[in-house]
Structures are given as structure tokens and as C-alpha cells.
């Protein structure tokens, strides 16, 4: 019984390491003095205690939108980093920001964060 329980725990721990970092965002109010621009806080939560990919190697690619300005990465908690962005959409519709991290443990991670202008 103990052997099967240890095997189950080891298997679960192995599966947990397959999941990529958690990427999410919070949108804020319209950016002051910028037409059609919104403030965005981008968050990356690392899954590995000692992540082999430096947070500075995180790439942002905008499609249908433009990143007007971006701040530096800030560590806000253990394993959680934040970056302030100002994003603008050229016209009504949607755009997206792709967040890319190339991890030697889990491979290329691509998260797509959609932004809609009404």
C-alpha cells in the first residue's frame, strides 16, 4: 500500500512539472493623454522554484495592437513577476499580445492575451 501511494505521489509530481508558467493580465483605465490606449498589468507566475529561464527573456509579440510603452519586470511575490504596459488598438476590434517563454524543461510556452476595443 505504501509503495503504491509513493508511486502515485511521484507520478503526480512528475505531471506537475509538465505544466508551463501561468501568464495572466489585468486591464486598467484608459491611459492618460493617449488616444485608444489602455493600461495593462502583465503577470508571469513561475512553476519551477529555480526557473532556468530569466524573466527578462520573456518575449512579447503584439498582433492587431501596439505596445506603446512598457516598464521593467518587478518581482511582486515569490515566483510572481509583473510588468506594466500601455497597449493601443488602431481601430475597433480585437488585438492580442502573445507572451513567449522558451523553457528547457517544458518547451516553448505561448500564452495569448486578447484585448478588445468596443
Image (cartoon, helix red, strand yellow):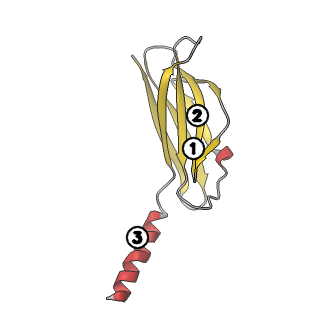
Q: Quadrant of the N terminus?
A: bottom left
Q: Is residue 39 left or right of residue 54?
A: left
Q: Nearer the viewer, mark 3 or mark 1?
A: 3
Measured Cα–Cα span from mark 1 to mark 2: 8 Å
Mark pair 3, 1: CA separation: 26 Å
Answer whether labels 1 and 2 touch (C-beta < 8 Å): yes
Q: Where is mark 1, residue-wise?
A: 100
Q: Earlier in the sequence, mark 3 or mark 2?
A: 3
Q: Residue furthest front?
A: 77
Q: Residues within 10 Å of mark 3 (few under 14, many from 20)?
A: few
From the viewer's perspective, is the residue at label 3 or at label 2 nearer? 3
Furthest-left residue in view?
A: 1
Give residue 61's mark.
2
Secondary structure type for disc 3: helix
User: Which residue is at a point 40% across and 82% down the rendered structure image?
Assistant: 6
Q: Position of residue 91 (x, y in %)?
A: 47, 13
Instruction: Give the spatial CA distance, label 3 vs label 2.
Output: 33 Å
Badge 3 is on which residue?
12
Label 2: element kind? strand
Coordinates of residue 22 in the picture (x, y in percent) = 48, 49
Q: Residue at coordinates 64% horizontally, 54% vertically from top-left? A: 53
> Relative to 92, is 46 above or below?
below
- Residue under the image location 46 percent in, 70 percent down: 14
3 or 1: tag closer to the N-terminus? 3
Q: Is residue 17 above or below residue 114?
A: below
Q: Secondary structure at mark 1?
A: strand
At 41% from the left edge and 74% from the top edge, which residue is drawn?
Answer: 11
Amino acid at each position: 500500500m505504501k509503495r503504491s501511494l509513493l508511486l502515485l505521489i511521484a507520478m503526480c509530481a512528475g505531471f506537475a512539472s509538465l505544466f508551463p508558467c501561468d501568464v495572466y493580465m489585468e486591464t486598467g483605465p484608459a491611459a492618460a493623454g493617449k488616444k485608444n490606449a489602455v493600461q495593462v498589468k502583465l503577470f508571469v507566475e513561475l512553476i519551477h522554484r529555480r526557473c532556468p529561464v530569466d524573466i527578462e527573456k520573456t518575449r512579447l509579440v503584439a498582433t492587431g495592437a501596439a505596445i506603446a510603452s512598457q516598464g521593467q519586470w518587478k518581482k511582486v511575490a515569490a515566483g510572481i513577476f509583473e510588468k506594466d504596459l500601455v497597449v493601443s488598438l488602431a481601430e475597433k476590434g480585437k488585438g492580442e499580445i502573445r507572451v513567449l517563454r522558451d523553457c528547457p524543461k517544458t518547451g516553448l510556452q505561448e500564452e495569448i492575451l486578447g484585448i478588445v476595443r468596443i
